[in-house]
Image: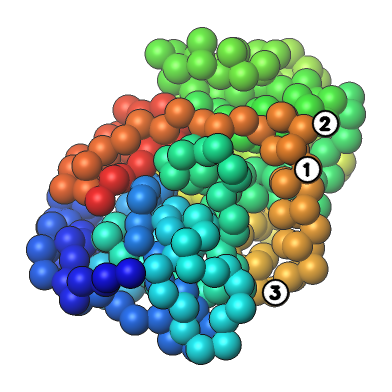
Amino acid sequence: MSIPATMRALEQTSLRGPQDMRLILDAPVPAPGQGEVLIRVAAAGVNFADISKARGTFLDGPRPPYRAGFEAVGEVVACGEGVSAPRLGDRVAGVGSGAFAEYLVLPAAAATPAPAGWSAEQALGLVVNWPTALAALKPLGRVAAGETVLVHAAAGATGQAAVTMAKHYGATVIGTASPGKHETVLALGADHVLDSRAENLAAEVRRLTGGADLVLESAGGTTFEASLAAAKRVTGRVVVYGLAGGEAPITNWELVYRHQVQVIGLNIGVLIQAAPRVFGELMGELSALIAAGVLTPARPTTYDLADGPKALSELEARATVGKLALRP
């Protein structure tokens, strides 16, 4: 299989945001090292982490100029030393540096087979959005049948998966989204949907359910305070896995005297490295959910690679629904 020497790729040139991302036409195609594979990218996933990196708010994020993107699905076209699986021609999803490009190097051990019959765009989320939602619900959030789960950004890729899985586990689900996305969230099975920017969000959650047993918090900013206030005292859990609306502090004084809740931090990359057994069990359950038809192929909004800055800007402005994909 012929592999070119150069490729198209998106490069972030500053920390001022996605508007300073540019398309380069002669980026060198990377070579897989030991334990790595090279894939021809069929679709790359767009995530809030890409925006955080472009604005310099991602912890230990790359310094510009850097190749943007980190999530992709594609065909294995070359294998480094010591790789027995996946094999040439296999379709896999994975995470690696520089996914907004025509070719990407992935760690072979972390390359996940794409489900048969699914397009590359539909398989996006297998290694980022869906594991994050499941980790927040099960091993960390300890969701149980009959409990109430509050899901912020419920119309987004991770939020949609969380709503679907929480309903499968027998929870009453409250989603938050902007008014134009409410029908999307209700169609997923949510029992209630609230305006994500309402000033009385916590009060409305408590009026509907008496308080949430579990809050999936990715909104950040001023919504973080509402998440803490919406959770049940003492037994309520707030799993924090995103900060789309900005950083929001909490003090030990507030945890003792104001918000007596359990606050749990989640970064799926850290979970993979620090708790590989937990992640393995999580991926096993995820595969079972896919096989049972609980999680079905998504219908992502697709952009051309050159329109990556536009896709990121629309995601940052909360003008999108579901997963976003770039096609090289």
Are the residues tagged 1 and 3 within 8 Å (C-beta)? no
Q: CA distance from mark 2 to mark 3?
A: 26 Å
Looking at the image, residue 125 sits to the left or right of residue 84; the answer is left
Res 288 label: 1
Query: Foreground residue, 99 or 113?
Result: 113
Q: Nearer the viewer, residue 320 or 207?
A: 320
Residue at 67% from the left image edge and 65% from the top image edge? 271
**Relative to 81, residue 36 above or below:** above
SS under mark 3 = helix
Question: What's the amino acid at mark 1?
Answer: Ala
Give the number of the disc on residue 274. Answer: 3
94 vs 275, left or right, is left
Q: Is residue 58 above or below residue 314?
A: below
Q: Residues under labels 2 and 1: Cα distance? A: 13 Å
Quarter where residue 301 is shown? top left
User: In x, y percent, where is residue 76?
Assistant: 45, 65
Q: Read off the residue under disc 2.
A: 169
Viewer-side residue, 59 vs 42: 42
Residue shown at the point (22%, 54%) measured from the top left: 17
For the question of whether residue 176 can be seen, the reply is yes
Residue 219 seen: no
Q: What amino acid is labelled 3 in the image?
A: Ala
Which quadrant: the N terminus?
bottom left
